[in-house]
Image: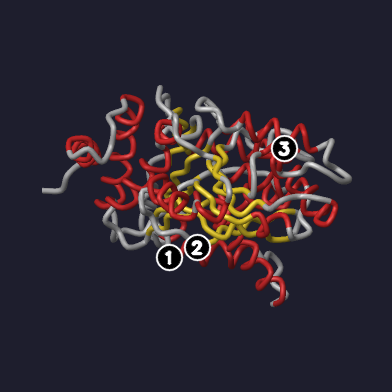
Amino acid sequence: MRQTLTELYEARVADGSLRPDPGQHAVLPALEDLRRWLEDHATRRTGLFAGMFAKPLMPPKGLYLWGGVGRGKSMLMDLFAEATAIPQKRRVHFHAFMQDIHRGLHAARKTGVDDPLAPVAEAVIKDTRLLAFDEMQITDITDAMIVGRLFEKLFAAGVVIVTTSNRPPEDLYKTGLNRALFLPFIAMLRERMQVCELESPTDFRQHRLAGAQVYFHPAGKAHGEITAIWKDLTGGAPSAPLKLPVNGRTIDIPSYANGIGRATFWDFCARPLGPADFLAIAAALRVLILEDIPQLSASNYNEAKRFVTLIDALYEARVRLICTAADEPERLYIEGTGSFEFERTASRLREMQGADWGL
């Protein structure tokens, strides 16, 4: 007899791989209901694909799980997706999924089709009964204009959608351009998904880092420690690059797993990235491991300016920063053009080392 998600969760608590949390425990029955429905109807087609003469078998509402960072949303999503025994499922970061959609749209437009979104949505529907998204965030106007029509097609076809987010539906794309056009999508989410807040009292990401060293210098001696922190925070999950669409371009976070990003200073600051790019990076992550911050001076002034903008974006988004650097924050940029302005950045780097940062 199959174990329920609650039984699987409690078994992991018993063996010490999870800490018990009442907020997480309370969400499991809703996920179990979706899992049971999906497995019990694994061979039945739904929605628009139920057949012309068969009564459509419409699925239950999906689940929109939101809450503060580090509360265990991604862990619950992993548990649910792994335990749902159907072949037609996809567990994916929301940004990565939207990047796939943009690629599909680009290819469809080349064919001259009237509605390029139609074949893209059909391709998703053909192979998917369950879409499990992590970290739903809408920061790009192009995504904002696409996502409503896309979800409408997915819902109509009977695809079950489960997603996590750091914010409630009403706060998606909150200050975005032409947001009035986005509001019907929020109403659709409320209608077609059960919206559930994960009210966990514990930030488990923060618990792992509480009291731990998060700023290492000199950089070259800390590689082993950084790798150990990466493995601990990601739970050993496999990592992959995360591609973020920003204003028609794509920026990469070289390594990503479970809301944790890992990159070097040069990955972000040696490229011509701007505030919108760094805001997208900050929005996509709960923790950033940034390695090899060099000594800064007039000789790498452009890179230093980008680094200042990156730290500002991470600071405002309350992203936990773990980094390796050539020296202490106050000694990274001690002379030359820009050194005076860097004092604020050094102060923020120091503040972000605090045990309660991000709470």
Q: Which amino acid does label 1 sit on?
A: Asp
> Label 3 belongs to which residue?
312
> Label 1 belongs to which residue?
127
Most distant residue in the right direction: 337
- Give the residue at x 68% y 55%: 268
Q: In this view, does 155 lie to the left or right of 108?
A: left
Q: Is residue 88 left or right of residue 197?
A: left
> Label 2 belongs to which residue?
124
Q: Position of residue 266 (x, y in %)?
A: 68, 59
Most distant residue in the left direction: 1
Q: Is residue 15 above or below residue 94?
A: above
Residue closer to the observer: 179 or 264: 264
Q: If you read the primary sequence from the N terminus, does the residue marked by circle 2 or circle 3 appear first?
A: 2
Q: Tell me if I can see residue 353 in this picture.
A: yes
Q: If you read the primary sequence from the N terminus, does the residue marked by circle 3 or circle 1 appear first?
A: 1
Residue closer to the observer: 318 or 103: 318
Q: Position of residue 319 (x, y in %)?
A: 58, 37
Q: Which amino acid does label 2 sit on?
A: Val
